[in-house]
Image: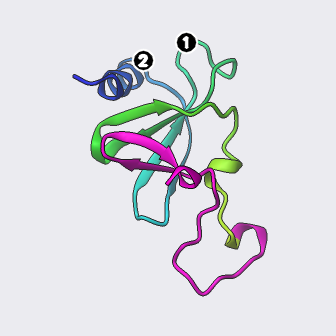
């Protein structure tokens, strides 16, 4: 079991509070959780249920991780709507858009 799978199991076993959900412009569904023990004193955890994986984000709120150009009033002709800090699941790891 990978570290990401262990964190996902930890969230499920401890009935972590879901803070929100989002679908990135790659079509990947994700859920954001509060840490079940440390609450808002810990960074937000992003879970990709379709991949049975979860990761610490380093962020303490959802605003940057769910931002799209459309949400700030910029309308692009592209399907590439996500801003730089939206998570992606690639090759078993969580990356932010700007890291690609």
Residue 39: image x %, image y %? 63, 19
As displayed, is residue 56 above or below residue 26? above
Q: Magenta segment, which residues?
A: 71-100
Q: Residue at x 68, y 22 (%)?
A: 40
- In the orientation shown, which residue stands out farthest toward the left? 1
Residue underneath mark 1: 37
- In the orientation shown, which residue stands out farthest toward the right? 73
Q: Are marks 1 and 2 in contact (CB under 8 Å)?
A: yes
Q: Nearer the viewer, residue 77 or 52?
A: 77
Q: CA distance from mark 1 to mark 2?
A: 8 Å
Q: How many marks?
A: 2
Q: Quadrant of residue 17?
A: top right
Q: Secondary structure at mark 2?
A: loop
Residue underneath mark 2: 14
Q: Residue at x 71, y 67 (%)?
A: 71
Residue 46 as seen in the image, left or right of residue 67: left
Q: Earlier in the sequence, mark 1 or mark 2?
A: 2
Residue 42: image x %, image y %? 64, 20
Residue 67: image x %, image y %? 67, 58
Q: Residue at x 42, y 64 (%)?
A: 26
- In the orientation shown, which residue stands out farthest toward the bottom? 77
Q: Residues within 10 Å of mark 1 (few under 14, many from 20)?
A: few
């Amino acid at each position: 079991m990978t570290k990401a799978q262990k964190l996902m199991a930890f969230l499920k076993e401890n009935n972590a509070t879901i803070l929100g959900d989002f679908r990135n412009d790659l079509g990947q569904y994700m859920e954001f959780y509060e840490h079940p023990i440390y609450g808002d004193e810990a960074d937000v955890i992003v879970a990709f249920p379709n991949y049975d994986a979860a990761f610490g984000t380093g962020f303490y709120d959802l605003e940057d991780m769910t931002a799209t150009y459309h949400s700030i009033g910029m309308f692009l002709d592209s399907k590439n709507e996500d801003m730089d800090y939206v998570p992606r699941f690639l090759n078993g790891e969580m990356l932010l858009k700007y890291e690609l």
